Amino acid sequence: MARYDYRCTSCGTVFEVEHGMTEHPAITCPCCGNPADKVFSASGIKFEGSGFYNTDMRSGGSSTAATSAPASEGGCSCADCPHQDA
């Protein structure tokens, strides 16, 4: 179930109705009983930066290599990690 905002075409009251996404019920205002229209608003999702593609993948050599210090240079190895107590 999804929640949608509706606005009365007569008195302008805005109210919320819960119904399935595929349902298209005839909604009436709880105050005056007149028909109400669905209020459409912008999504809260914002995509920034480059790299948003249909497949979420890029072709080409613009990827960066992972950077980590080897265990011999002061980096961590799994044998030294505390989660290896088993």
Image (tube, rainbow, N blue to C red):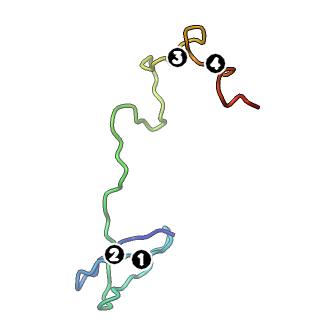
Q: Report which quarter residue 14 is drawn in.
A: bottom left
Residue indicated by mark 1: 17
Q: Is the residue marked by circle 2 packed among few (<14), some (14-19), or many (20+) residues within 10 Å?
A: many
Labels 2 & 1 near each other (Cβ < 8 A):
yes
Q: Is residue 72 above or below residue 36?
A: above
Residue indicated by mark 4: 77
CA–CA distance in space, label 2 to label 1? 7 Å
Q: Is residue 68 above or below residue 45?
A: above
Labels 1 & 4 near each other (Cβ < 8 A):
no
The mark lying in front, picked from 3 and 4, is: 4
CA–CA distance in space, label 3 to label 4? 11 Å
CA–CA distance in space, label 3 to label 1? 52 Å
Badge 3 element:
loop
The mark lying in front, picked from 3 and 1, is: 3
View extreme (top): residue: 72
Disc marking residue 6? 2
Question: Which badge, 3 or 1, is on the more N-terminal residue?
Answer: 1
Image quarter (top left, top right, bottom left or bottom right) of the C terminus = top right
View extreme (bottom): residue: 32
Q: Is the residue marked by circle 1 packed among few (<14), some (14-19), or many (20+) residues within 10 Å?
A: few
Which amino acid is tagged 2? Tyr
Which amino acid is tagged 4? Ser
Q: Is residue 58 above or below residue 9?
A: above
Q: Position of residue 77 (x, y in %)?
A: 63, 18
Residue indicated by mark 3: 68
Q: Position of residue 20 (x, y in %)?
A: 51, 71
